[in-house]
Image: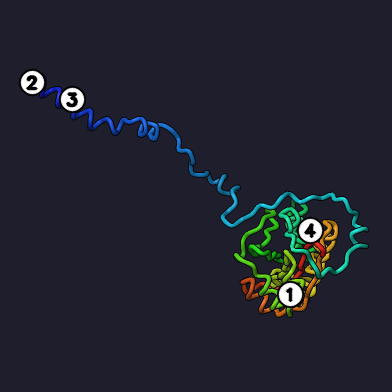
Amino acid sequence: MLFARTLTLLMMLLLVLLPACSPRRWMEATQHPINPSPTPDEQQKSPSPGTIDLPEPKTEGAMTLEEAIAKRRSVREFSPEPLTLDEIGQLLWSAQGVTHPAGYRSAPSAGALYPLEVYVATPEATYHYEPNGHRLTIQMQGDLRPQLYAAALQQESVLNAPAVFVIAAVYERTAKKYGKERSPRYVHLEAGHAAQNLLLQAVALDLGAVPIGAFYDNKVKETLALPVDQQPLYLIPVGHPR
């Protein structure tokens, strides 16, 4: 009788202990998780949701600068072929990309204050370019080209181009050093520098482009949901010439 009771107690004890010592729980208790939480350094290197890292920009091409200048023309008719991520990245880099370890950019800026912000609208979404890091962040999902087309007095190139680049400016960045009276001139000159860089880069990539200044500022700003301090200055449709 005593033996039977002892055996029963041992069996009950084993039933209690076995789940805690099962191979699965043992593995969970002794091994590192498959997807450990990232360290602070890893979090800093990892892109945030909605961010796209662009391909490394090229600093050498098949076309000379002189040839690109000679071939540059305003192109308003485009094929439906989309631009590649390499092409978009190269165009953005030419307009506002970082070209020096000190943070200097591809276009000259009064006082190196860099008041310009660049966006690109595609059929899928509209993106904001981040020069530091050479990447895109999603500004808005969906195709905003029809709204930009309406804001730009229904110019067909805005509606039909596979990508519409938008150059906006924060005047206050320049005004802090040069004052409100003089700074608009410097900002507008800089927008012209950036736009010409982008136009010549388009030629070098066998693309067509046209700079557009005729649009309702408030409608473009509303369409892109630009911050209060940003003012649109240029629309530049870009695509493969038809």
**Rendering coords of residue 174 (x, y %):** 73, 69
Query: Which residue, given by chain and number where applicable, does mark 3 sit on?
Result: 10
**Rendering coords of residue 221 (x, y %):** 66, 75
Q: Is residue 240 visible?
A: yes
> What is the spatial separation of the Cα atoms under label 3 and label 2, in whole angstroms?
12 Å
Q: Quadrant of the N terminus?
A: top left
**Rendering coords of residue 4 (x, y %):** 11, 22
Query: Which residue, given by chain and number where applicable, does mark 4 sit on?
Result: 94
State the residue in front, 160 or 85. 160
Of pointers 3 and 1, the one earlier in the residue sequence = 3
Of pointers 2 and 4, the one earlier in the residue sequence = 2
Q: Quadrant of the C terminus?
A: bottom right
> What is the spatial separation of the Cα atoms under label 2 and label 4, in whole angstroms?
90 Å
Query: Which residue, given by chain and number where applicable, does mark 2 sit on?
Result: 2
| Closer mark to the observer between disc 3 and disc 1 | 3
Classify mark 1: helix, strand or loop.
helix
Q: Name which residue type carries label 1.
A: Gly
How crowded is the residue under tag 3: few (<14 C-alpha within 10 Å), some, or many (20+)? few
> What is the spatial separation of the Cα atoms under label 4 and label 3, in whole angstroms?
78 Å
